[in-house]
Image (cartoon, rainbow, N blue to C red):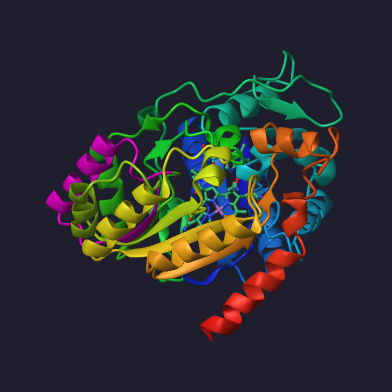
Amino acid sequence: MRILLISSNREICGAMTPLPLGLACVAAATANAGFAVEVLDLLQTTNWVAAIQTAVTAARPDVIGLSVRNIDDQTMVNTRFLLAPLRDIIALCRNLCDAPIVLGGAGFSIFPESALAYLGADMGIAGEGEAAFPKLLSWLENGRRSAPPAGTYLANTPLARQPRTDGAGLDSLALPPPALWLQATLNPTWPIPVQTRRGCANDCCYCSTSAIEGRRIRCRDTNAVVRWLSNYCQRGLRNFFFVDNTFNLPMAYAKDLCRKIIKARLDINWSAIVYPKWVDSELAELMAKAGCLEVGLGFESGAEPVLRLLNKKFTPAEVAEVAAMFADAGIKRNGFLLLGAPGDTRETVEESLAFAESLHLDFLKISTGIRIYPNTALAARAVSEKIIGRDDNLLFPRFYCVPQLREWLPQRLADNNKSCS
Ligand code: B12
């Protein structure tokens, strides 16, 4: 069977542009299972229509796999819904060939039923695709004679929510070599995404990660990660982004990884996302020595009662300690605030803004309102507070914001900007 895998994301965000690592992982696993695979990344093309026409004509696919990453930009004011252009991609594929279209990816995993219905594809897989996609291909190849493999959602077929399909340890899943997914014309400023762990058990009340990666933390062998990184270095690529939800957890694993990167003298630069607790100065220093230039610190609030309602396990004092450790190690800190969260009042918002300022961060992103994802504690709260209805289709972005702050927050933040300029 010939398989064409298309990454549909066309959102370029400067030096942070996310190359499609997930699709590349699925491609590597599919090729290893004996299928003929071609990968098309629409980010790395200038004319997506021509690129799809050329790829479909050349590959003559029996199945097309399409990754669905972004649903929207998670911004409450003037929200951008990013799924509509995918309908055009699917329509074009349908015009060019009869291959069934299979969806997968982070955005799809959060909304399998509603994304499948909205996009009008044939089927989809929620969760990780390395094991599930080749199984689905074999099922299609064998004429769909048995029940579809676990984890599959079929169009127009009401199914119970499918079980997660990620039983395997990460070391049994292939890592994609550069040639499989990076074109020769790759923009050298875009970091190569690296994933060393999956799963997060922190249960922040609004977060969708457990729908995408599960709650169980699974780690890849650090030697394999270092070998993988050095493959990219050999191609002259030295700029990476660790896409792990929390680079610092488990801390012993993070230290081991940094030590091995240092020992291998890879001479790389990278950024990572850090949970602002469970960091010590040894870890911050090891990260700096291993090439970390910048960390994202999603502390979201500076007010203890709000942090508790968000189900954060840290206090503002711990965030300040962690921020200082990274500054001392020479690592830049990007902070994130989510205002209008459960429990927020004008006073807690002022507290959070003052707290963020006290950290002397290198960059601060302030969001107002929190994107509501299905099956989260925040969604249940939003239903009970009548911010959303029980049956609202959350594929179409809805935001939690304390009603009394909805009007005031944008004005307050505009004042903040004025006083900064
Ligand atoms: C790291 C990250 C970033 C980094 C990316 C850095 C980089 N260079 O790659 C940064 C900070 C830049 C970023 C930015 C944004 N992000 Co982001 N990001 C993530 C994060 C934490 C990890 C993504 C990742 O790389 N995973 C690793 C790979 C291996 O996994 P994967 O892609 O999911 O692939 C697996 C499966 O999904 C599946 N699969 C994938 N493709 C396919 C295809 C088929 C056919 C099949 C069968 C299976 C399959 O198999 C793969 C392997 O198991 C996710 C949350 C999460 N835990 O997933 C959010 C996430 C993807 N981001 C999200 C968003 C919204 C954004 C932004 C729009 C935020 C903003 N307002 O700026 C931007 C968009 C950027 C852009 N231009 O597209 C949302 C998307 C959902 C939504 N509401 O749209 C997520 C899910 C977070 C969330 N809120 O839930 N992001």
Q: Nearer the viewer, residue 225 or 300?
A: 300
- Can residue 139 be seen here? The reply is yes
Q: Residue furthest top?
A: 146
Q: Residue furthest left?
A: 263
Magenta span contains residue 248: yes
Seen at 16% across and 53% down, the residue is 262
Magenta span contains residue 337: no
Residue 345 vs residue 421: left or right? Answer: right
Q: Which residues are magenta?
A: 246-274
Q: Which quadrant holds residue 249?
A: top left
Q: How many marks?
A: 0
Q: Quadrant of the N terminus?
A: top right
Seen at 20% across and 40% down, the residue is 256
Q: Position of residue 306 (x, y in %)?
A: 56, 45
Q: Position of residue 50 (x, y in %)?
A: 70, 67
Q: Nearer the viewer, residue 15 or 136?
A: 15
- Can residue 183 be seen here? The reply is no
Q: Position of residue 185 (x, y in %)?
A: 47, 70
Residue 65 lies, with reference to residue 12, above or below; the image says above
Residue 351 lies, with reference to residue 164, above or below; the image says below
Q: Position of residue 49 (x, y in %)?
A: 73, 65
Residue 257 vs residue 180: left or right? Answer: left
Q: Which quadrant holds residue 179?
A: bottom left
Q: Residue furthest bottom?
A: 421
